[in-house]
Image (cartoon, rainbow, N blue to C red):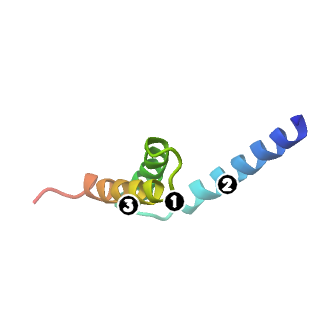
Amino acid sequence: MKHSIRKLGLVALLGTSMALSACSNMSARDQNTAIGAGLGAVAGSVLTGGSAAGTVGGAAVGGVIGNQVSKPPR
């Protein structure tokens, strides 16, 4: 059991570092969109008990909100 937890932690660390490095050439608006989608997916999953539709819906809503946060004023 302890060995599998260590592997899971290593995979999570690797995935996180890859995801963060992918954001290095993104604009601030693109980064906010990606962060919003990620947070929305987590929130949608939690609020719907792990439903796939809730996760996808949360990601879509979060992405739109994240995109609009950094919109320049008119």
- The first of marks 2 and 1 along the sequence is 2
Q: Please count the marks in the image.
A: 3
Front of the two marks 2 and 3: 3
The one nearer the camera, 35 or 58, is 58
Measure how far apart labels 2 and 3 are at the Cα level. 21 Å
Secondary structure beneath label 2 = helix
To which quarter of the image does residue 5 belong?
Answer: top right
Q: Label 2 is placed on what type of residue?
A: Gly
Residue drawn where x is 51% and y is 59% of the image: 23
For residue 12, side relative to residue 30 (left or right)? right
Q: Label 1 is placed on what type of residue?
A: Cys
Quadrant where the image shows the C terminus: bottom left
Secondary structure beneath label 3 = helix
Q: Residue 39 in the image: x percent, y percent? A: 45, 47
Return the residue at label 3: 60
Return the residue at label 1: 23
Front of the two marks 1 and 3: 3
Q: Residue 56 in the image: x percent, y percent? A: 45, 60
Return the residue at label 2: 15
Q: Residue 17 in the image: x percent, y percent? A: 65, 52
- The first of marks 2 and 3 along the sequence is 2
Mark drawn on residue 72 = none
The residue most toward the left is 74
Residue drawn where x is 43% and y is 42% of the image: 47
Measure how far apart labels 2 and 1 are at the Cα level. 13 Å
Query: Within 10 angstroms of label 2, few (less than 14), some, or many (20 or more) residues?
Result: few
Query: Within 10 angstroms of label 3, few (less than 14), some, or many (20 or more) residues?
Result: some
